[in-house]
Image (cartoon, rainbow, N blue to C red):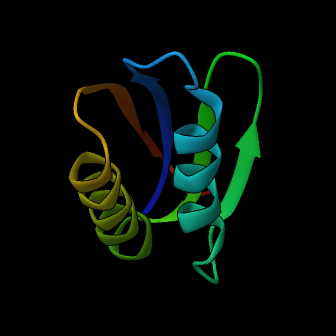
Amino acid sequence: MQIAVEISMYPFRPDYEQPILNFIGLLKEEEGLRVQVNDMSTQIFGAFDTAMPKVQSAIKEAFSEEQVTVMVMKVLHVPEG
């Protein structure tokens, strides 16, 4: 099952760029995922069983490093064929 995940991350701190770059770096480590970055969000494409555990671990890592961070996430099932 293929999915697309769109995540927007909002660290509540003046130097917000580095936590976002760290989060994107964690996602890009996973083989089998395609990660696209734009000005508004990060988009992850791949198999459900690959993408969701990686997204979960990257969010957990970001939350453990930051005092207050908001994540907005959308998940789309991409029908094959």
Tell me: residue 59, above or below residue 1. Answer: above
Q: Residue at x 64, y 62 (%)?
A: 25
Residue 75's image quarter? Answer: top left
- From the viewer's perspective, tell me whether residue 3 is left or right of residue 20: left
Q: Give the image location of residue 16, x and y in percent.
A: 55, 26
Location of the N terminus by quadrant is bottom left
Tell me how many marks there are. Answer: 0
Q: Nearer the viewer, residue 57 or 2?
A: 57
Q: Give the image location of residue 36, x and y in percent.
A: 75, 44
Tell me: residue 12, above or below residue 24. Answer: above
Residue 74's image quarter? Answer: top left
Location of the C terminus by quadrant is bottom right
Q: Nearer the viewer, residue 37 or 77?
A: 37
Q: Residue at x 22, y 55 (%)?
A: 64
Specify the farthest residue to the front.
Answer: 14
Residue 46's image quarter? Answer: bottom right
Q: Give the image location of residue 6, x and y in percent.
A: 50, 33
- From the viewer's perspective, tell me whether residue 2 is left or right of residue 22: left
Q: Give the image location of residue 43, x and y in percent.
A: 61, 40
Tell me: residue 67, above or below residue 44. Answer: above
Q: Residue at x 52, y 52 (%)?
A: 23
